[in-house]
Image: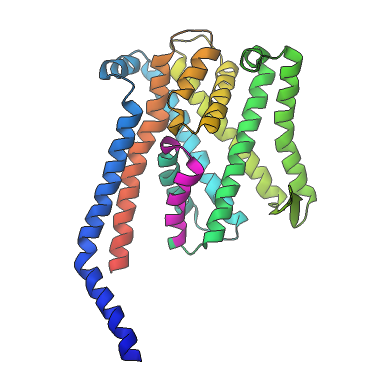
Amino acid sequence: MSLSSASPRAAWRSVWLRWQKPIKLAGTAAVLALTAYLLWRALRPYSVAELGAAVAAIPAARLMAAGGFAAASYFCLTFFDYLALRYVGAPLAYRRAALASFCSLSLGHTLGLAGVSSGAVRYRFYSRWGLSGEQVAKLIVFCGVTVALGHLALAGGALLADPSLGERALRLDATAVRAVALVCLALPVLYLVAAALVRGRLILFGRSVAMPAFRLALAQVAVAIVNFACVAACMWQALAAISDAGYPEVAGAYAAANAATMLTHAPGGLGVVETVVQRLLPQSDLIGGLLVYRLIYFLAPLAIGSVTLLVTEIMFRRRAGA
């Protein structure tokens, strides 16, 4: 019995030892090919001259500020995972949460359908570190809720600060825009109230949902707000050299563009962000600044994240082989 069960195992091991190098090379090539494809697809609508002129038109101080806000956003995003790991009962070290978060989101932001694309990368990391499939699924949902809370807070704050933008975007009068803004701001507050009052599970739309502890929920809302404020600030700095729009106006335009991206599932909001922002902001030609924003917030992290993912895959495989 033991001999017959051992023989297939030995045969499979022999096959794996024979083919593991070609398989690893194929995996590496696939990652590189995916990176190249994503970069090509994102840059395809623009010529090299347009990209060069767009970057050249932005002062170095603005570029550095936009890059700083983009880095701050991705730093905030690492805490989405860090807090989610505590929510699912698997509190890993921050460095692991940060690695999984950056690798997954730097690709997911550009791929589109971030919950699916980044979720696959997250699963690859966290399953190696002992999380079950159910825990990873709950982690992804927690991160999705964090995104929604931050987006609602940014949209509500921007509409209150500049109702005229909401009038153009929503075709409503100022009173109705303020009402929409207050609803957006009320939802994160209600989430915190529920976290403070509900012990255990909450029945929502016929489903049982485990509410996080109040402190965890408070940290979740806070980091979500700071993250989206940083993303809007990145866009604002990229546009500041060619637009007179203030931060609240740019933040509102970004919130509208982000909502449109979620509805269309366009990869990285490609084409959607440019169309919505140019429609809502007063200047007619903002493509240069929007290209710079896309380069800084999407393409640079995509390149760095792809290389980081490739290196970690090689390290994981070497450890597994050892």
In percent of the image, x 64 and y 37: which residue is there?
A: 149
Q: Is residue 211 magenta?
A: no
Between 15 and 154, the one lying in front of the other is 15
In percent of the image, x 72 and y 49: which residue is there?
A: 214
Q: Is residue 177 above or below residue 190?
A: above
- What sort of colour scheme is used for the picture? rainbow
Q: Is residue 122 magenta?
A: yes
In percent of the image, x 74 and y 48: which residue is there?
A: 204
Q: Which residues are magenta?
A: 109-127
Place residue 12 in its image quadrant.
bottom left
Between 262 and 188, the one lying in front of the other is 262
Q: Is residue 80 left or right of residue 174?
A: left
Q: Is residue 29 above or below residue 253?
A: below
How far from the left and from the top, in percent, is residue 24? Answer: 25, 57
Label count reads 0
How far from the left and from the top, in percent, is residue 51? Answer: 31, 19
How far from the left and from the top, in percent, is residue 263? Answer: 55, 31
How far from the left and from the top, in percent, is residue 241? Answer: 43, 12
Quadrant holding the N terminus: bottom left
Quadrant holding the C terminus: bottom left
- Farthest residue, direction right: 197
From this viewpoint, is residue 252 visible? yes
Report the predominant secondary structure element of the magenta stretch: helix
From this viewpoint, is residue 91 visible? no
Between 65 and 157, the one lying in front of the other is 157
In percent of the image, x 67 and y 46: which residue is there?
A: 217
